[in-house]
Image (cartoon, rainbow, N blue to C red):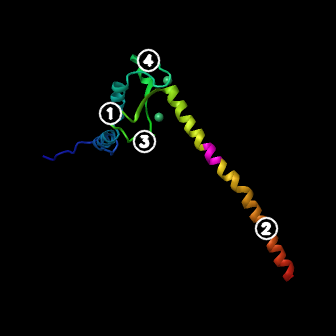
Amino acid sequence: MEKKRPQRSGAPVSEEKVNSAIAGLRASIPVAGYRELSLKIHGSVCARCGREFSGKNLRLLTVHHKDNNHLNNPPDGSNWENLCVYCHDDEHSRELLGDYEQGMSKPAREEPKKAAKMGSMEDLLRAALSKKG
Ligand SMILES: [Zn+2]
Ligand SMILES: [Zn+2]
């Protein structure tokens, strides 16, 4: 008897490979793990506005990393701060604004110097050309 190979109608990508890849990602980034631990340690209260969260609203309470390193998760909770999404957003928008201001001030100061140098170079070139010509 000739054995018939089981025909797969789906895509050639095996589901097992995808699942193991996802499992690997989850293992390296224990997002749900540290959030629950932080809520246990610091309580279900926003550290900034003091609002309490429970039930469905609990998902609005997020964990902020004080040193902004999401991989730094000490089990004593010293790097975590429970912030509601509104306060968390505010916290990070201030940081971004700070970076933006710092980034803006540097080139603005350097530009006039560059322009002056360019001008003097042009003058030198013209002087050299006028001497030759
Ligand atoms: Zn808040
Ligand atoms: Zn944060």
User: Outermost residue toward the bottom?
Assistant: 132
- The x and y percentages for residue 44 are 39, 21
Q: Amino acid at mark 4?
A: Glu
Q: From which residue to which does the magenta span run?
A: 100-104
Instruction: Please state which of the two labelled residues, at mark 1 or mark 4, is closer to the viewer.
Output: 1
For disc 3, the marked residue is 69
Residue 25 found in image quarter: top left
For marks 1 and 4, the one nearer the N-term is 4
Q: For the residue carrying disc 2, how many other residues have a C-alpha within 10 Å: few (<14), some (14-19), or many (20+)?
A: few
Q: Amino acid at mark 1?
A: Asp
For marks 3 and 4, the one nearer the N-term is 4
For disc 1, the marked residue is 76
Q: Amino acid at mark 2?
A: Ser
For marks 1 and 2, the one nearer the N-term is 1
Residue 129 found in image quarter: bottom right
Q: For the residue carrying disc 1, how many other residues have a C-alpha within 10 Å: few (<14), some (14-19), or many (20+)?
A: few
Is the stretch drawn in magenta largely helix, strand or loop?
helix
**Front position in the image: 25 or 41:** 41
Which label sits on residue 52?
4
For marks 3 and 2, the one nearer the N-term is 3
Of helix, strand and loop, which one carries label 3? loop
C-alpha gap between disc 3 and disc 1? 16 Å
Left or right: residue 29 compared with residue 5: right
Q: For the residue carrying disc 4, how many other residues have a C-alpha within 10 Å: few (<14), some (14-19), or many (20+)?
A: some
Which label sits on residue 120?
2
C-alpha gap between disc 3 and disc 4? 25 Å
